[in-house]
Image (tube, rainbow, N blue to C red):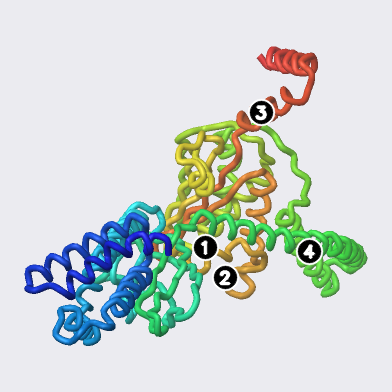
Amino acid sequence: MAPIARYMPRYLGVFSSFLLAEDDLARERALAEAGECGKSLLADGPALDHLVELHGHAQRRLVQRWAQAPAGTPEHTALRQLAEGEATPLLLALILSHDLAQQAHNERRWMHDHGRGTALFEHTDDMIVVLGKQGEVDSVNPAYTRHTGWSPLQAATRFETMFPADLPTHQTQIVRNRQLRRDGSDFTVEWSISPIRTGTGEVLSHVCIGRDVTHHQKIEDGLRENDKLRAVATLAGGMAHDFNNLLGSITGLAELCELQAEPGSRMARNMGRIRQAGDKAAALVRQMLDFSRQTPRQLQAMTASDMLANSQDLLRAALPPQIQLNSHIQQDGMVQVDLVQLEQVLLNLTRNSAQAMDEEGGTIEIHVDRAEPAQAAVADADPPRRHLRIRVEDDGCGMAPELLPRIFDPFFTTKPVGQGTGLGLAAVHGIVASHQGVIEVTSRPGEGTSFSIFLPLAEAQVAAASADMKRTAPVAVVQGLAKQRDQSLSRKQ
């Protein structure tokens, strides 16, 4: 109230000048002076109700001052004008500066907020899609264009259905789905969909903020797959050992009965069939043990060319004559492998490729080079080559996309009943994992299949072991081990 009291004498003069003005010019001057008074009051930052209160106090004082004015005097006339509300223009002139200042402040605030919102919309790396009331695309930000390759116009006119049919109306909804790029590839996006409502609750639009979570999705799928395979492997390993014990008794008794039976008799033939069935069951047990990684490994260091040279005859003998097998060594490297188990891996993969080509024949290509698994490539844009890659490719019938996530599941097979146990690729996965390796597969119907096996290079393992040894072992021990290594190398030479 102190600022109002300070300006009261000045405003009383302006007020009386306005009511006692003899012509329009004098009245305009009074209105201009009221505006200047309002500008002066802005320095003290009064609220609008304080200005109205100043006007009301001044009006009451003038009424008290002119209450006894005789009829016909200017004060009496001014009092009548005051009663009829003709002093309203003076109040409007007083608060005009406040209104203009408030409007300027609102404009600056809007420009600031709009500029900040535009900057966030334009420069954020998250994809932003604004949907209209009917779910149509209203606008997309540059990040969406960068991630997908679609221009804003293309996104609006060729936008595929990517959100639920029933968009949220009250609270934010999280949706994860596949988003198509312009080049035909796709990636996983997690969208946060928020409804924008009016004061009455009507939904005007939806703001969708998306983030590429393809890498996180692969990690989650990998962890989920590993947990599932670990649980099944534990069960399979336990069953395999118990079943192997029972199978040993059955096979042994069948062999004894076969020896005691008359040669060529029906009993001997039946015992022979039992023994053959036991041998098949024993092979199945070995597959289960390979899958559960409980078969002891005998690692040896060898190059990929040596490994393929040792396996070439075995692989060719297992393939039909109409299937051609070619090997290509682009980049060789030393790996620590169990040759028997790796031969089993290559044998399973090449047999699957041959079955995918049926009787029409075709070509199986084995390529060896250095590369990194897809997960490592995503995590590091330019990773050092720490893995040897063995690719087994065929030009067979390929597989449907929905089958790829399940091909390494134990007991899952696409072959007819009686032609597959569903443990071949599961055993391949177990053997590769036991070698600290990674296996990946790509396939499309009618375009063939490619299995990629990533094995750690032996030099990378030696370098890592040496680094650990230097951190933990005394210098003398390290020097002693280095001396032993040099002596071993000199003996080989």
Please state if 206 lies on the left or on the right of 11 as rendered: right
Q: What residue would you read off at disc 2?
A: 415
- Tell me the mark number nearer the camera, choosing from 2 and 4: 4
Q: CA distance from mark 2 to mark 4?
A: 24 Å
* Residue at position x 69%, y 47% in the image: 434
Q: What residue would you read off at disc 4?
A: 235
The answer to whether one can see residue 228 in this image is: yes
* Residue at position x 16%, y 64% in the image: 32
* Residue at position x 48%, y 64% in the image: 190
Q: Quadrant of the N terminus?
A: bottom left
* Residue at position x 77%, y 49% in the image: 295
Q: CA distance from mark 2 to mark 3?
A: 42 Å
Dot 2 falls on a residue whose secondary structure is loop
Q: Are marks 1 and 3 in contact (CB under 8 Å)?
A: no
Dot 1 falls on a residue whose secondary structure is helix
Q: Earlier in the sequence, mark 1 or mark 3?
A: 1
Q: CA distance from mark 4 to mark 3?
A: 34 Å
The answer to whether one can see residue 141 in this image is: no
Please state if 60 lies on the left or on the right of 322 as rendered: left
Residue 430 on image: x %, y %: 68, 53
Residue 34 on image: x %, y %: 22, 65
Please state if 323 lies on the left or on the right of 473 as rendered: left
Residue 462, numbered circle = 3
Q: Earlier in the sequence, mark 2 or mark 3?
A: 2
The amino acid on which the numbered mark 1 sits, given as a three-letter code, is Gln
